Image (cartoon, grey):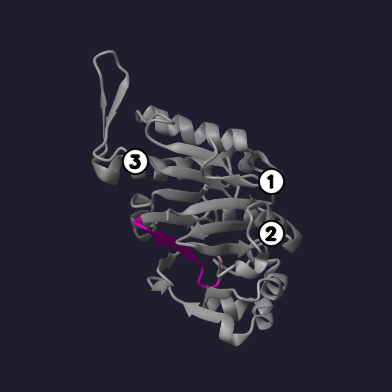
Amino acid sequence: MSVEVISAGSSSSGNSYIVKAGGKKILIDVGISAKRIISALCENLIAPENIDAVLITHEHIDHVKSLRTIARMCPNAVFFASEGTISACDKFSHVPDERCRTISSGDKVSFDGVNIKTFDLSHDANEPVGYSIVSDKEQLTLITDTGIVTEEMFEEIRTADKLVIESNHEVDMLMCGNYPYLIKRRIKGDYGHLSNESCGKAICRMLIERNGISVKKTTDGEADNIASNTKIPSIMLAHLSENNNAPFYARQTVECILKDEGFIKGRDYSLTVATKEGICSLNDR
């Protein structure tokens, strides 16, 4: 069975994703209200007691807000997080020890046939991790809350069939906004958040390097892409700032970067933008 990912809500104020993989039902982060998470599960015909695992990226409140309630309402779920995240988040005290699994960057866990891999993020949290989930030879990679894309992260991006990646802010909006300078510097820093431009450049490199894709210009100046693999990656832009971004700007910046390199949406990739409210899937266009 292929991997499916659905955003139950994604923004600088809260994030949670539903993943279906190999017959398993997984939540990645629970940073929105439990009511919204349960509603999203029901809308996708998933009973809370059928959630098999909850993967936590780091301890910031926009990723763990409903951890206590979800631990109670999803009684069969096993919770995965780094030791640093667990120690920094008092909400884990409400998760029974027998349902907690400590993971570290680089770990590969087989969860009833679904393979989960962790990797470091560059963020001002205590041992944050990103996740790749592989089922039936299809890979989903989720990378949000990172100030830069390291080579370790890019190796996961490069091989992803489905990619959820942070497109947090438009730099001009951030710098012209009313945030204090120190917060602006933190967001732009190596341990902050990816800008729309940085996100677009990472996706562009992904399309260039994966599966032997090359880009050339035809005699009339148009771009012509030649790929050894006709399966195109599905990409979701996520974790948009409420104050320094908007879906239109994120999409426009990323698509312009890709178009400048000869990549065309619908032919070389599919793209959707996760929003604060409402459910969206990588199958959306």
Residue located at (65% from left, 43% from top): 244
| Circle 2 SS class | helix
Is residue 129 covered in magenta? yes
Question: Is there a contact, CB below 8 Å, between mark 3 and mark 2?
Answer: no
User: Can you tell which quarter of the image residue 208 is in?
Assistant: top left
- The numbered mark, 3 or 2, whose residue comes first in the sequence reads 2
In the image, which residues are magenta? 125-137
Q: Which mark is residue 231?
A: 3
- Front residue of 93/85: it is 93
**Could you give the CA–CA distance between mark 3 and mark 1, rounded to whole angstroms?**
28 Å
Is residue 227 covered in magenta? no
Q: Position of residue 87 (x, y in %)?
A: 59, 81
Residue located beneath label 1 in the image: 278
Inspect the image, locate mark 2, and give the three-letter code of the amino acid beneath it. Answer: Ile
Q: Position of residue 278 (x, y in %)?
A: 69, 46
- The numbered mark, 3 or 1, whose residue comes first in the sequence reads 3
Residue located beneath label 2 in the image: 37
Q: Which mark is residue 193?
A: none
Q: Is residue 261 above or below residue 93?
A: above
Q: Is residue 201 above or below residue 37?
A: above
**Could you give the CA–CA distance between mark 2 and mark 1, rounded to whole angstroms?**
11 Å
